[in-house]
Amino acid sequence: MRSHAQVEPLGIQKPTKKSRYWNITFKECLTLLIGTAIPVAIGIYAAVTNEQTQKSAKRAEDKQQSIAAERRMFELNETAERRIFDLKEAAERRAFDLKQAAEVYQQQLYKNFLDAMYTLHRDGELNDSADPWPFANAHYRGVHREFDAIRKAQALIFLKEKKLIGRENCTTGCEPKLVKDIIRLNGLGFDNLNLSSETGNLSRLDLSCVVFDRISMINSIFSYANLNGVIFRNSRLNGATFRDSSLNCSKIIDTELHGTNFYNSNLNDALFNNVDLSTAVLTQTQIQGAHFENVILPNGTRISSTTTMTSIITEERKTTEATTEATTEIKTTEATTIKITRVMLNISVNATWSKNGTTIAGGNESGGATNQLNVPHGLSVDDDQTVFVADTWNHRIIQWKQGATDGQVVAGGNGQGNRLDQLNVPTDVLIDKETDSLIICDQYNRRVVRWSRRNGTTQGEILITNIGCWGLAMDDQKYLYSTNGDKYEVRQYRIGDGNETLVDGGNGTIVAGGYGNGSGLNQIHGLTYICVDQQQNIYVAEGGNCRVTKWMKDAKEGVVVAGGQGYGSAPTQLGTPRGIFVDALGTLYVVDLNYDRVSRWPQGVKQSTVIAGGNGQGAGENQLYWPTGLSFDQHGNLYVADRKNHRIQRFSLE
């Protein structure tokens, strides 16, 4: 019997056990993906590799171009520098040639002048009978206008040696017999002359009895010169310096003397008539030896009547129970009594000081012996050149007399402390001549104290308390000024007539700052030392602002008078200003601690000149190491507290 087996339809296959997707097995799918992915990956790899290759090539090309550009720039710079050097060298060569030519011309001009004077002498044009000697004067005046300063000085010396000028016999008294000069020095310019003896005090340069009429001798220098009987009439001597010279019986009449310095010169029986000496530099000894008619003295006092200073100036000692007060008075013929206050130092803006300093105190390493100092800060110099030093870390004030090898402790020196016989880090010291005492900034004790200079004084008295004092100043009106670093301000205090106390009880008046710490013109940052001029303008050293500001009387903000151009060593900049001093001309002198130098800033000038130091840190004679304080003596010599060298250096005025 036939089986009824089920028959599969035609064309229909029996399913297998393998998985299928869209009629494709997983293996086939994987094979397909691999076959597709590999070429894509290879393509991507190739593309990336190609891109990296292109980038590398681009970088290499850029680098080559950069190198080429740098090479071209270097070559251009080198060419430019070579061109600049060549131009500079050519300019220097031309300048040298011009200088040499000018010197040769001046030498030839002077030789021609001597030949002409010889010819005039030979022809009898210089004899007394040739009066008024027109040819000689015409020739001299003609060549004078072409002479440089050196030849003008040489010509003056020649004319005096040949007795063509200064013919009066004025060496025996102040009333000479009138003898006419053959050459008349009138209406001529003699600015910036240097008339100095070649041998110093061994043989003075003789210019005695010469008459200068309506001449200009601005910024000229007379050094070791015999100027006895000389007459300056209707002339200009602004900024001139008479150094170690003799002007006995000289006459200075209707002449400008702005900034004139009579440094260590003899003025006995000299006559000043109708002149303004308010900015000139004279000592009281010189004032006492001279005669004055219608004159303004350096302290602003006007004398209208004829006054013989040698016979009428007296020095009186007025003794009180509190102190001994020295008072110098001028008694005129009209019985007017005038008190002389301090003479404001006046230094020519062209003055120079010795490059090498002389150690006049300390310099024997740091220590507490009397021949040593330990980080000196402020200092003051008395009329006899005794130096008073704030010996900061020895907690004392020590005085060094001129030429002494050891100092003498005059305040403190009894260890660090707050007793009245002790000091604690003093930073500044002033000399108060009226009370014959020292005023001291006792910094760590936050006070200002006064110590009498009388023998037997063992302790000081407190003037001001609770003040962050660093620097002090005093003016002619008996006002004391103190910095107050806590409140970024300077305060003014009035000392009473009896000098026992402060009139305001020690509160004082703010005269600079007081508006917080900052760089605004009404603010102060890094307050240290101060000074004051005759108009009571305050000068403030701001270490944090790298500047010195001037605060006019009653002003609410200061004016930058030095630095203020950021920290730096350029002539227009300051690093860290410390000690400052202003003279009668308004010239400012600044100690720059971080650049180890002292710089001069003339009034109205925004650029300084280094006058001491500036040769790097060191202990050499021409070096300073963190200088801090400065002062001048009445002769214009500069004293610097050389802090890290533990010494005081004196730079002599040349």
Image (spheres, grey):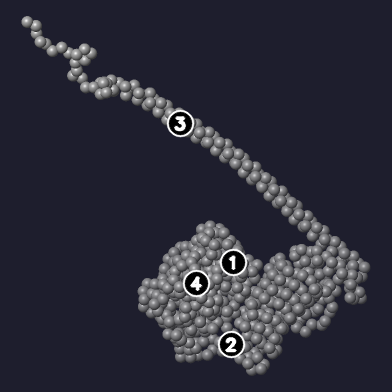
Name the amino acid, label 4.
Answer: Asn
- Where residue 339 is drawn, which disc sits there? 2
Q: Can you give x and y, in whole percent of width and height, for residue 510 in the image?
A: 47, 78
Pick whichever of labels 1 and 3 is earlier in the sequence: 3
Q: Which residue is mark 1?
A: 600
Q: Which residue is mark 3?
A: 51
The residue most toward the top is 1
Q: Which numbered mark, 2 or 1, is in the foreground of this view?
A: 1
Circles 2, 3 touching at the beta carbon (< 8 Å) = no
Q: Residue at x 15, y 12 (%)?
A: 7
Query: Does residue 379 show up?
Result: no
Pick whichever of labels 2 and 4 is earlier in the sequence: 2
Q: Nearer the viewer, residue 43 or 610?
A: 43
Circles 4, 3 touching at the beta carbon (< 8 Å) = no
Name the amino acid, label 3.
Answer: Glu
How crowded is the residue under tag 3: few (<14 C-alpha within 10 Å), some, or many (20+)? Answer: few
Q: Residue at x 46, y 86 (%)?
A: 503
Q: Secondary structure at mark 4?
A: loop
